[in-house]
Image (cartoon, rainbow, N blue to C red):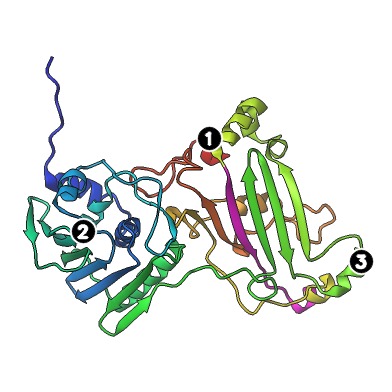
């Protein structure tokens, strides 16, 4: 019996896993930012040198010739584990897993030079034009880390587009362990944290915290929505805080997913693992409604308007970045269009009234699987639950 292995041209791999595998250039840049994060970099710089060149420089662990041969050039193989402690004693959960992220370079440019060095090892230079790749030693590289030079950029990066890249990275990166700096001519900015600390009365009317554990949803609401005059109409109710425990299986009764049966759903919820959400609820009201319903404000001084983002540890999952109503809040509200004052109490929160994030974990929520192209999740039973 003869065992066979597939052979495939380098340029074809680059086209399939790079150019066609990422929905846009920003997603490809994010993939390279993840690589810097996963090697312990404290700072990664994205430097647009001119209209045709982008440098990505980090001070992470770097690579030697063995790393290039065994890992960098081995498609589909990842040497990344679950987490590690960086030099500043921050715990980082590694974002990479599938061993194809390096092909984000192909999406961005036609010619690549990678300069890298590990501690106590010689520096290396890896070059490719996606038809052939070369590797050389370079003893002139002094400091550990990696510098990737992308020449012949496939697209133009205008000042407006670079500012949008900053906004994109702000939404998609949710950590402080590594700083991201973007440089282009007069432009020089660090990417900020997107979500502020929830402060009811300042940047939301209410902060909603949810935690799932083994089929139970634990809910806490911290509100500054109504004036103190509301207390006399409902003296038995705390209008500032609310806590609840919801049995999810009971909540599913009447839903088509309930046809699977309580036993199967209970088992699937256990597999799903623990996760949490931190949401901002806000709405603007008229002066008439403010007086009628005893709202405290017409509007809050600040607002968070980005929708709900799904993060797996430090990075968001593409397609769940707040642009679309992936939680289906709009669909629910259209089924119950009544106003909040309706006697039935059937009012539903609209998608434009909630922002914030849902946080899942690479290991704890392993049944929530990334698609191979990193552009979303497999919408399996775990995702539906």
Residue sitting at 64 percent across and 26 percent down? Answer: 263
Label 3 environment density (alpha carbons within 10 Å; few <14, some 14–19, many ≥20): few
Q: Which residues are magenta?
A: 274-289
150 to 385, vertically: above or below? below
- Left or right placement of residue 39 versus residue 351 in this view: left
Query: Could you tell me how far apart the alpha carbons at marks 2 and 1 are, in whole angstroms?
Result: 43 Å
Number of on-image labels: 3
Considering depth in this image, is 137 or 345 the residue closer to the camera? 137
How far apart, in angstroms, are the residues tagged by discs 2 and 3? 68 Å
Task: Locate residue 30, reporting x and y percent.
Answer: 34, 60
Q: Earlier in the sequence, mark 2 or mark 1?
A: 2
For the residues labelled 1 and 3, say whether their Cβ atoms are less than 8 Å apart: no
Membership of 277 in magenta stretch: yes
The circle on residue 233 is 3
Q: Position of residue 144 (x, y in %)?
A: 22, 64
Point 25% across, 55% down: residue: 104
Q: Which residue is mark 2?
A: 118
Dot placed on the residue nearer the N-terminal end, 1 or 3: 3
- Nearer the observer: mark 2 or 3; the answer is 2
Q: CA distance from mark 1 to mark 3?
A: 44 Å
For this orientation, the residue located farthest to the bottom is: 186
Describe residue 278's horizontal placement relative to residue 339 as left or right.
Answer: left
Check disc 1 and report the residue beneath it: 381
Q: Secondary structure at mark 2?
A: loop
Query: Would residue 295 be found to the left or right of residue 237 on screen?
Result: left
Residue 317 image point, x, y percent: 43, 53
Left or right of 115: which side holds 210?
Answer: right
Could you say which is closer to the camera, residue 318 or residue 336? 318
Residue at the spot x=72%, y=60% of the render?
221
Q: Residues within 10 Å of mark 2 (few under 14, many from 20)?
A: many
Q: Quadrant of the C terminus?
A: top right
Q: Looking at the image, is 188 positioned above or below residue 142?
A: below
């Amino acid at each position: 019996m003869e065992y066979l292995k597939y052979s495939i041209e380098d340029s074809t791999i680059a086209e399939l896993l790079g150019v066609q595998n990422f929905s846009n250039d920003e997603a490809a840049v994010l993939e390279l930012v993840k690589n810097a994060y996963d090697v312990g970099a404290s700072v990664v710089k994205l430097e647009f040198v001119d209209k045709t060149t982008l440098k990505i420089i980090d001070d992470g662990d770097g690579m030697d010739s063995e790393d290039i041969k065994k890992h960098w050039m081995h498609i589909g193989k990842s040497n990344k584990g679950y987490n590690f402690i960086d030099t500043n004693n921050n715990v980082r959960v590694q974002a990479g897993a599938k061993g194809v992220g390096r092909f984000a370079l192909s999406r961005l440019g036609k010619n690549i030079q990678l300069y890298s060095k590990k501690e106590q090892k010689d520096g290396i230079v890896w070059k490719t034009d996606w038809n052939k790749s070369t590797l050389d030693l370079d003893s002139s590289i002094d400091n550990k880390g990696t510098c990737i030079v992308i020449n012949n950029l496939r697209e133009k990066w205008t000042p407006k587009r670079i500012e949008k890249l900053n906004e994109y990275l702000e939404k998609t990166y949710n950590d402080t362990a590594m700083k991201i700096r973007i440089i282009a001519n007069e432009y020089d900015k660090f990417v900020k944290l997107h979500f502020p600390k929830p402060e009811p009365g300042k940047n939301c009317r209410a902060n909603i915290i949810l935690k799932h554990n083994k089929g139970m949803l634990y809910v806490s609401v911290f509100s500054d929505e109504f004036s103190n005059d509301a207390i006399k109409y409902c003296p038995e109710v705390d209008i500032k805080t609310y806590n609840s425990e919801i049995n999810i299986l009971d909540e599913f009764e009447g839903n088509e997913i309930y046809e699977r049966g309580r036993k199967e759903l209970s088992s699937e919820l256990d597999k799903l693992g623990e996760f949490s959400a931190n949401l901002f609820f806000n709405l603007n009201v008229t002066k008439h409604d403010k007086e009628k319903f005893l709202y405290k404000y017409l509007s809050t001084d600040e607002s968070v308007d980005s929708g709900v983002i799904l993060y797996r540890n430090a990075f968001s999952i593409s397609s769940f970045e707040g642009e679309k109503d992936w939680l289906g809040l709009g669909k629910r509200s259209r089924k119950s269009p009544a106003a909040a004052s309706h006697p039935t109490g059937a009012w539903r929160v609209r998608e434009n009234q909630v922002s914030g994030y849902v946080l899942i974990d690479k290991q704890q929520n392993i049944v929530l699987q990334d698609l191979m192209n990193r552009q979303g999740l497999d919408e399996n039973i775990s995702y539906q639950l």
